[in-house]
Amino acid sequence: MTLGGAASPNTPNNPTSLESTPAFAAIAPLWSDWNGLTGAGAQVLGRFLDFDGNGRPEYLVINWRGVNHGGINPTTPENFATFQTILQLNTGSAPGGIYFNYQDTNVGDNNFNNGATATVGIKDTNPTNGNFLNIYVNNANQDLSSGRAIGVVAVSQASQSILIQVNNVAPVLTADPTNVTVINEGGTFTGRIFITDPGVLDTFTGTVNFGDGTGVFPIPPSNPPLPAGTTSFLVSHVYGDNGVFTVTINLTDKDGGQAVPLVFQVTVNNVPPTLTLAPNQFLIPGQLLVLDGVGGRPFLGTFTDPGFTPNPPVSVESFTTTIDWGDGIVETVPPNTLNVTQVVVNGAPGVLTRGTIAARHLFAGVGTFQVRVTVTDDDGGFATQILQVSVGSTHVYAVGADAGGLPFVRVYDSTLNFVVAQFNAYNTAFTGGVRVAAGDVTGNSLADIVTAAGPSGGPHIKVYRGDDFTLYREFMAYDVAFTGGVYVAVGDINNDGFADIVTGAGQGGGPHVRAFSGFDNSILFDGFAFDASFTGGVRVGVGDINGDGRMDIITAAGPGGGPHVKVFSGLDGSLLSSFMAYDLDFKGGVFVAGGDTNGDGLAEVVTGPGLGGGPDLRLYDPLNGGVLIASTLPFPPITGGSIFTGDNIWSSGLRVAMTDFNNDGLMDIVVGPGSGQKSNTRILSVINLSIIREFQPFDPSYLGGVNLGGN
């Protein structure tokens, strides 16, 4: 921009031209008696300023320093004056103006009042006095015609020095409105932050405080700074605990411009722990329950939680375990005790917090106990699971000595393979043998033992409790005069939650079958399985063969009746199935038991031949006329010697029962010999009829055979 023209600059009232296109971008004032820019160090400096940030400068500021005052010794410092000119450009409808600020150091002219400030401005373009420029001295308006004119001359480009300053504009931060700001504890918050900045060359650094006390983190996390041209960046953080957290983000550009801090909130929801308990436990009375994770034993419980104690530990993720043992005793940790110990291993981002619960407990009574374990975190989230502990046994099988021995009964836990109880069911003078069955007659979820006397003992039925094996009930199934012995089975015929007792008359009594209510001993079924004139007796078993939720009654003819098997409905006594288990010529009778061996909800029937038969075990689907599913020889058919002599051919037949031995929900087969063999008893897996356990319940010298019962 050039001020000045061809007219003499020293002439008063000489109008000056203001050109819109800068030629030299310089302005120089001269008093009428000055000699120009001749002082030592004299210079003119100029710069454009953009105050409102719109990209266009509004002000041109020019400074004169060391201007020589004419007629004064130029070597005298006070003879040099300093001027400043501010040109406000015309940026709109309002005209701009030029303002000269002059500080008189010592020009020796009283008219200018040494040290006063003089301001010279452009006068209105429609002057009333014909003057274009006025001088204002000490606030008094004096016309330039007084001889103290101000001249404006052009300054050569070579002699000028122009500085242009661009003001910095601080960046502006905004959060992406699609950011997910509600998460679960242990989860990761990730947010995108936008940067707005007119400086295309600006780089950025900053900090973020996630509001959970874990510290202030740099942006970016490591050098170098966010590069020029960055329009957005991500912040990410894993919250270890729940709450509402205020996130504060600060950003600074390379020139020190600081954005207004961006502040928003992240809500972190609590997540309750996840609890897993040990498998259901089975104890004999007086046995201490120990679940401590030692020596292959499981812990009572383990739990996990996505929350964790951060570092530094501004908040602590803690847990309380409460155990209701179901027998009136409740324990809470921490603090840990000798009986219950809780150990927590703190997690980290991406790593779950884990806890273990070790416990031991002695149940004062017998029965089935529902152990309720609850783990609660410090924010009230909790998980509850129930562990069933049976003191006594729910899955058992029983072995009774047959004729010739004491009326001795041994009860085995099907799952844990130990002897639950052993006792003489009748007077020790009785040697007619004892028949056995197992089922929950008392309705306390434990398997009770039901016994029946063999030949010469009368139709005497006894029920022994499954918790303490004391006598619970006894009755005569038939006329007290009948001494042929009784066969027995147990199952819930009427679906009332109590196992009912099914009896079959022994040899000499006819094929008379009865079912007695486990609840009140009333008769639920009373009939003859075969022709009433048949006197070989009837063996019994139970199983839900049609899937109606009721145990059906399985019957088989005793000696002399052929290998005939019939099944009667537990609902109405109707005949459901009838088939021959062995060759029609076999007259030794058949032993039967029922249970679901394949998980389809329908019971199969397992059979063993009576005395005179070989070790021929068979498994039938009783529906559709009795379909043979599988067969095996659980014992060798020849025990020694030569097959030609016949002396050692197995002819003791088989006794059978069913129980869930390995707790897989499928009924396995218990099989043992009749009279003439040692009491070797085997348990066969229903998967492939392989032997999974073998034991000898009685003295090796005892050869009377075994009676078996399971549930």
Image (tube, rainbow, N blue to C red):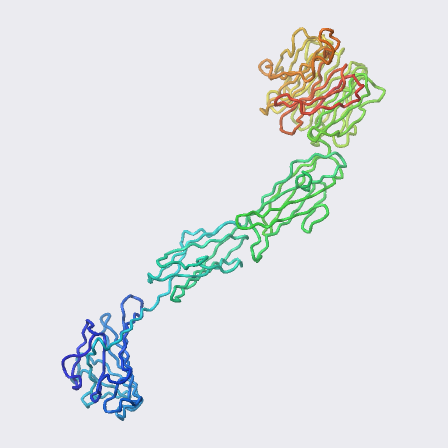
656 vs 326: above or below: above
Q: Nearer the viewer, residue 89 or 615?
A: 615
Q: Position of residue 241 (x, y in %)?
A: 55, 53
Name above or below for residue 371 compared with residue 462: below
Position of residue 472 in the picture relative to residue 343 (left or right): right
- Choose top left, top right, bottom left or bottom right for residue 541: top right
- Image position, residue 140 (x, y; %): 26, 88
Residue 14: x and y in percent read 16, 83
Identify the residue at image location x=19%, y=81%: 153
Instruction: Choose between 61 and 542: the one closer to the eye.
Output: 61
Residue 2: where, in percent of width, then height? 20, 76
In the figure, is residue 35 to the left or right of 192?
left
622 sits left or right of 672 in the view? left
Q: Is residue 552 above or below residue 151?
A: above
Could you tell whether 72 is left or right of 375 in the image?
left
Residue furthest to the right:
429
